[in-house]
Amino acid sequence: MNTNTPEHQPGAPAPASDADASQPLSQGTQEALAQAGHAPASPGATHIRSFVHRRGHITQRQRDALEQLMEKWAIPYAARTLDVQAAFGRSAPTILEIGFGMGETTEKIALARPGDNFIGVEVFNAGVGSMLHRIETSQIENLRIIQHDAVEVVRDMIPPDSLDGVHVYFPDPWPKKRHHKRRLLQPPFVQLLASRIKPGGYFHCATDWQDYAVQMLEVLGAEPLLANTVDGYAPRPDYRPQTKFETRGLRLGHGVWDLIFKRV
Ligand SMILES: C[S@@+](CC[C@H](N)C(=O)[O-])C[C@H]1O[C@@H](n2cnc3c(N)ncnc32)[C@H](O)[C@@H]1O
């Protein structure tokens, strides 16, 4: 998704069928989200955030989902190791997705791979509301959400050598040079993420920004815990569905670059 400005996050426009609900969330929801670790300003955080706080548009359906479904499908952020088996009620290969946006891709992948557990991390209310609604509607038993900064989730909740895969699809491009420091995939975070993947597990990211693709290839290529599965960029694997943004972008002649590395 070619998001030209950071303000465009979390990516997809709201479904036109939904009623506008640009009022602030109720006190109860705000408190519930705060308990869930919503878009945090965690004490002691020193890293540059890859997102900005802002009050965005939220539809009534997303709002309802936030009010009613957080407890059912979300895992609250906590600065302690997550018991994945307890969270899903089973032991299965576990994939972490960072920045699922409105959740369209996540839903398709989780439904197509019922044998895997998926943990989706996202910060923005509209995206989380949309994903909760999808999980409830499609009863996606193998998907849980954590609404929190992924850097802190990976650092605090995910044990080393535990993930079977990581997905980072179309992370915010932060196109202006002075904002590049906000890009998610920088050496320290890639190193941290790689340390959480099991040997043999995979790290899959995709972008439609050429200079971010070049940066990803450099950063992932320089990480000693990762090895490229191909020479350069990978073909889009069948399990990653093409998003509508991507389809439109490709029609307009934009490129999309997938990178698939393995944890050594
Ligand atoms: C451009 S959107 C892409 C959404 C989706 N992956 C897609 O392909 O449509 C990037 C998303 O990453 C989320 N994001 C950015 N930084 C994040 C962070 N540190 N932790 C969790 N989510 C983050 C943003 O809120 C945004 O929804």
Image (spheres, helix red, strand yellow):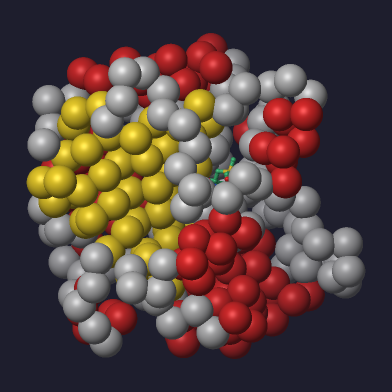
Q: With 42 as the anchor, is 183 left or right in this view? A: right
The reply, left or right, for residue 233 in relation to residue 245 is left
Q: Quadrant of residue 27?
A: bottom right
* Left or right: 251 as drawn, with respect to 183: right
Q: Is residue 255 above or below residue 23?
A: above
The answer to which quarter of the image holds residue 96 is: bottom left
x, y percentage for residue 60?
78, 75
Residue at the spot x=47%, y=52% of the render? Answer: 239
Q: Residue 35: x and y, percent?
A: 41, 75
Q: Is residue 12 left or right of residue 167?
A: right
Q: Quadrant of the C terminus?
A: top left
What residue sits 48% from the left and 67% below the top? 112
Q: Nearer the viewer, residue 135 or 200?
A: 200
Q: Residue at x 67, y 37 (%)?
A: 246
* Position of residue 107 measured from the top left corner of the image (x, y, whole percent): 55, 66
Q: Is residue 91 above or below residue 42?
A: below
Quadrant housing the N terminus: top right
User: Is residue 155 shown to the viewer in this render?
Assistant: no
Count of numbered labels shown in the rendering? 0
